[in-house]
Image: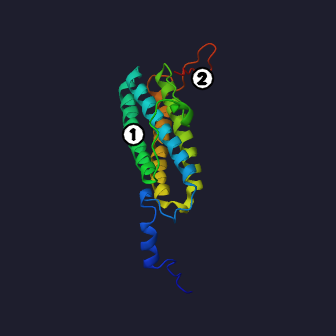
Amino acid sequence: MAAKPFLSDIKTIRQRAREHMERGAVTDSYTLDRDTVLKLLNEALATEIVCVLRYKAHHYLASGINAKSVAAEFLEHANEEQVHADQIAERITQLDGTPNFSPEGLLTRSHAEFVVPEDLAGMIEENLVAERIAIDSYREIINYVGDRDTTTKRMLEGILAMEEEHAEDMKTLMEDFGKKGEPAKPKERSGDKAGKSKR
């Protein structure tokens, strides 16, 4: 089987590199619709920012018998979600885009919601739901990007792996919660089956 030839000679690569230098890392060999990729990445950035804020709110508002250890888990996740946000923002700038950190419209850009229940079990449940949303979202973006942007794909695959760990952490907390003297399910409130309070 013959080896696949290298498609461009060095002279052509050097010539292309000097064209459109204002685009930075984005060269003519980038075949994805960059506007779509930037939109998807800014939605992912908004999702991570909302997740940071939700985990931080839960960290500071957690109360109950087991609040200290669960709140510590929330804070750890908040810090890891911040790292994801920074990675995504950096990739957006590498693709010659502008990371959207504006608070205006943040929740409409985010795939995840900002929900702060009154009880610890409800907080755990909301974080698990948000992680599952993030997992599905990242899988779809990875499938869209495919091998046409391997740098973005590798970054998103790393973030996806961490979100899967977060979901597993929340699932474990939910399963263990009832064994430690507190209800494993959120409290039911009249007129609000899920016991959620959106703020």
Residue displayed at 52% across by 48% down: 38
Label 2 sits on a secondary structure element that is loop
The numbered mark, 1 or 2, whose residue comes first in the sequence reads: 1
Residue displayed at 52% across by 77% down: 7
Q: Is residue 170 above or below residue 138?
A: above
- Circle 1 is placed at which residue position? 82
Kind of residue at badge 2? Ala
Of 43 and 155, the residue lying toward us? 43
Of 106 and 56, the residue lying toward us? 106
Q: Residue 62 location, x and y as percent? A: 41, 23
Q: Is residue 39 left or right of residue 22?
A: right
Residues tagged 1 and 2 counted as in contact (Cβ below 8 A):
no
- Circle 2 is placed at which residue position? 194
Of 124 and 109, the residue lying toward us? 109
Residue displayed at 45% across by 65% down: 19
Kind of residue at badge 1? Gln
Furthest residue in direction top, as rendered = 190
Label 1 sits on a secondary structure element that is helix
Furthest residue in direction bottom, as rendered = 2
Q: Residue 56 location, x and y as percent? A: 40, 29
Q: Is residue 186 left or right of residue 69?
A: right
